[in-house]
Image (tube, rainbow, N blue to C red):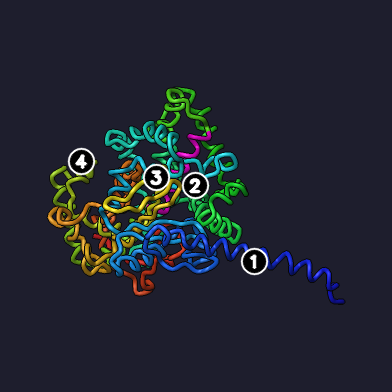
């Protein structure tokens, strides 16, 4: 192979060198954004800034934000600047500023700044991701969907799914139980019944369409991983490239399901007491489109499938490790049930105070939203400073950093539900515990998620004594996952009571 002509080499050199210099100058200038404004900064490195990872296996900053939090907190800073590639982001450490941004001055931080591409992927334009006026309108329409009265109409459907789960667990006595898989099937049955009016029967048929779709949503191959990198770090470029968070197969599944359900339920005889029916009713009164309904149904599925199942399996793992706590919880549950003629009701769940503490402590250790993001929609001056957050700047609240801060939660690695007694809660700043966000953009489906999860935990603890299997590997949370979930299967043993 011959050498390139001198002229060609010179042309390449004259093109590449100025380009490299221009890129380096651009990054050098961008990396001075925060220091020019007097904001303490975590030193960035070319070319990733403070991203640290090239291809995350999900659309999340994950535990990296705890590193940011710890760096700033240890140096006494209340906030600090970072760069995701070249984009300036502000990390909030002080809980007073957290309260200002998420709640008190919410009008300046209405948007999450989460990527969506409605034209090519209608499912991505859901309530979690939408911005501004569209988010506000949809939130107002959907808020009545998750009232206590609506939860009560779905309660019996969850109880039916619970019965299938208890029956399945009873067949695995004295065997290793993959508790995450059990909770996943229970959750998918609940979502299928309460959201779509579909009986999934996943304990009987684990290869049913719904469970398979849930696994596909959270599976990251190389192409989806590459897209995740661009979506997280370069959202504007991602929009220009028209990247889609979800594969066509997933989009088609949910849109077809909604379209078929609307046609079926035009007949009043086919009405159901489920989430989809509420949305179909809104279609007529609030002029929702099929794509808008499909997007919210998808969000309900997405938020409930892995989040609730992981939360329940992690809570049961901690109860299996902490037998005293398990015994006290069982004692409380039986006492409450005795006051309700042995029946588990919506009202009786709220009387189980220790149950609530167990859930809160599980959520502290393993928050479903370990990082909260908000985008500034108009220039905002941080209280008691001259620092102005400019419109368009992304703000990061590392919930996991607050949750694991020994100033607020001494010995933070330890599972200790008593942290959430009424007395202890009153002694802490309200914005150091943020498992579902805070303010107007908190999790709208919180009531359903907790109801479903509490029914699952109560039913397991009343019927079985749990212990950790000798084959269970030490619990490790996947640092690259979009949601909080263990790297390895969580194996427990159950003894029928």
- Residue at x 18%, y 56% (from the top left corner): 428
Distance of label 3 from label 1 (alpha carbons)? 33 Å
In this picture, residue 377 sits left or right of residue 22? left
- Residue at x 35%, y 43% (from the top left corner): 441
Distance of label 4 from label 2 (alpha carbons)? 30 Å
Read off the magenta span: 291-307
In this picture, residue 12 sits left or right of residue 1? left
> Label 1's element?
helix
Q: What is the crowding at mark 4: few (fewer than 14 residues within 10 Å), some, or many (at least 20)?
A: few
Mark 3 / mark 4, whichever is N-terminal: 4
Distance of label 2 from label 3 (alpha carbons)? 44 Å
Q: What is the crowding at mark 1: few (fewer than 14 residues within 10 Å), some, or many (at least 20)?
A: few
Mark seen at residue 20: 1
Residue 308 location (% of width, % of height): 36, 52
Viewer-nearest of discs 4 and 1: 1
Mark seen at residue 347: 4
Residue named by callout 3? 379
Mark 4 / mark 1, whichever is N-terminal: 1
> Label 2's element?
helix
Residue 450 location (% of width, % of height): 30, 48
Residue 177 appears in the figure: no
Residue named by callout 2? 210
Q: What is the crowding at mark 3: few (fewer than 14 residues within 10 Å), some, or many (at least 20)?
A: some
Viewer-nearest of discs 2 and 1: 1
Mark 4 / mark 2, whichever is N-terminal: 2
Mark 2 / mark 3, whichever is N-terminal: 2
> Label 3's element?
loop
Question: In this rendering, is residue 146 above or below 3?
Answer: above
CB atoms at circles 3 and 1 under 8 Å apart?
Answer: no
């Amino acid at each position: 192979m011959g050498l390139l002509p001198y002229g060609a080499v010179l042309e390449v050199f004259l093109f590449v060198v100025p380009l490299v210099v221009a890129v380096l100058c651009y990054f050098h200038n961008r990396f001075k954004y925060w220091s020019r404004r007097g904001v303490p900064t975590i030193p960035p490195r070319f070319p990733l800034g403070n991203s640290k990872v090239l291809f995350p296996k999900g659309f999340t900053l994950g535990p990296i934000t705890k590193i940011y939090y710890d760096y700033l907190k240890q140096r006494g800073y209340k906030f600090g600047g970072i760069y995701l590639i070249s984009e300036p982001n502000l990390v909030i450490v002080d809980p007073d500023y957290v309260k200002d941004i998420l709640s008190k001055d919410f009008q300046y931080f209405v948007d999450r700044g989460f990527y969506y591409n409605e034209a090519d992927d209608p499912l991505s334009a859901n309530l979690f991701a939408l911005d501004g006026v569209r988010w506000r309108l949809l939130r107002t329409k959907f808020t009545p969907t998750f009232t206590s009265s609506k939860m009560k109409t779905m309660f019996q459907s969850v109880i039916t799914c619970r019965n299938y789960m208890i029956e399945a667990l009873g067949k695995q006595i004295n065997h290793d139980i993959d508790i995450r898989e059990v909770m996943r099937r229970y959750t998918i049955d609940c979502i299928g019944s309460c959201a779509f009016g579909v009986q999934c029967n996943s304990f009987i048929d684990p290869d049913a369409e719904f469970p398979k779709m849930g696994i596909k949503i959270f599976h990251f191959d190389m192409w989806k991983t590459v897209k995740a990198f661009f979506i997280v770090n370069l959202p504007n470029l991602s929009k220009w490239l028209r990247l889609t968070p979800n594969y066509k197969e997933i989009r088609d599944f949910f849109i077809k399901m909604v379209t078929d359900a609307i046609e079926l339920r035009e007949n009043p005889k086919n009405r159901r007491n489920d989430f989809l029916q509420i949305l179909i009713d809104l279609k007529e009164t609030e002029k929702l489109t099929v794509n808008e309904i499909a997007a919210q149904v998808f969000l309900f599925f997405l938020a409930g499938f892995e989040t609730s199942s992981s939360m329940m399996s992690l809570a049961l793992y901690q109860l299996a490790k902490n037998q005293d706590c398990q015994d006290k919880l069982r004692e409380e549950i039986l006492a409450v049930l005795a006051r309700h003629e042995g029946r588990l009701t919506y009202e009786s769940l709220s009387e189980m105070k220790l149950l609530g503490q167990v859930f809160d402590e599980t959520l502290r250790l393993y928050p479903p939203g370990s990082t909260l993001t908000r985008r500034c929609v108009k220039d905002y001056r941080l209280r008691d400073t001259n620092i102005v957050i400019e419109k368009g700047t992304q703000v990061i609240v590392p919930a996991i950093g607050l949750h694991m801060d020994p100033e607020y939660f001494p010995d933070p690695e330890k599972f200790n539900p008593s942290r959430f007694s009424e007395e202890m809660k009153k002694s802490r700043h309200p914005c150091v515990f943020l498992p579902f966000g805070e303010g107007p953009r908190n999790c709208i489906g919180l009531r359903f998620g907790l109801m479903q999860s509490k029914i699952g935990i109560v039913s397991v603890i009343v019927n079985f004594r749990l212990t950790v299997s000798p084959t269970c590997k030490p619990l490790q949370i996947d640092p690259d996952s979009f949601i909080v979930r263990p790297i390895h299967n969580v194996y427990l043993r159950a003894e029928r009571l």
